[in-house]
Amino acid sequence: MTLLAKRLRLVRTRQGLSQEQLGNRTGSSKHLISQVEQGRCGLTNPRLTSAAQALGVSVDYLFGLADDPTPPHQLARRLTAANARVRDLEDQQAQAGITDDGDFIGVAHIAPAAGSGAVVDDERITGGLKFRRDWLRKHGLNAHDCRVLRVMGDSMEPTLVDGASILVNLARQRRREGRIYVVRTEDGLIVKRAGKDHAGAWQLVSDNPDQQTWPPRPWPPDAPMIGEVKWTGRTFA
């Protein structure tokens, strides 16, 4: 089943619409909507746009190019409001004579799996974590190009434990053997180390020493890289 099929059905059912109702709103038939949701066919661009508008989500979300369903105009308003809050905070700090030597990095409401994959239905910034500017510069990082995510699963232990936070550099898209990356597969987001097999083909490798449970697997050629993991933080029980 395609990502379009899964997301179209997910959003439609969440909003309590029947296939016939969605078809009427998009100039399509119930049969066509059913075929799309079964992955047997797609939607033309005009109908895809109509479906997105009818469901109140973005076209990129339905098509699998984004994981936040929020339409672009709403995202723009949120970004403007968030920037205004940051400016207010900076003004307050300046008035109080506080020297700000750090940058906030957005904490995203998604969790890449250190395992078989995490399905992402909602991706949004829920907070911020401040990192020292000199540390960011030392590691060649720009706060605007980074996100803090939470890891699920234990396939990357002991390097990354279940529930650990990771800083991901979204600007780093070039694979380097031995580095850890967040990758989008057909199963969802996963976090793995980049490796190569004896023939030189790229693999997704787990750090967990139990290689019987977590064996290396081929890096799917169509699996895009989200970014490189540059830092991790954890809570001790």
Image: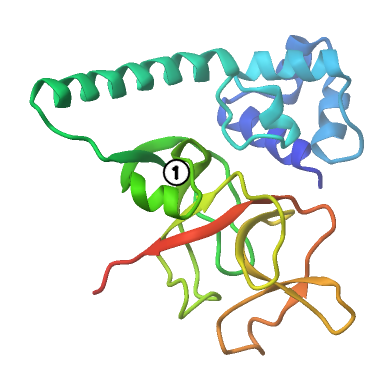
Q: At 28% across and 67% down in the image, what residue appears?
A: 235
Horizontal relation, residue 223 to residue 182: left or right: right
Q: Which residue is mark 1?
A: 109
Q: Quadrant of residue 208?
A: bottom right
**Residue lying at 41% horizontally and 63% vertically, measured from the top left:** 232
Which color mode does the image show? rainbow
Residue 57 in the image: state x and y as whole percent: 61, 22
Q: Eyeballing the image, is 183 above or below 109? A: below
Residue at image coords 46%, 80%: 158
Q: Would residue 142 appear left or right of 201 to someone viewing this image?
A: left
Q: Nearer the viewer, residue 9 or 167?
A: 167
Tell whether 237 sits left or right of 146.
Answer: left
Instruction: Please tell me in which quadrant of the rendered image residue 2 appears.
Output: top right
Q: Is residue 23 visible?
A: yes
Residue 97 screen position, x and y as percent: 9, 27
Residue 217 position, x and y percent, is 76, 74
x then y, percent, for residue 234: 33, 66
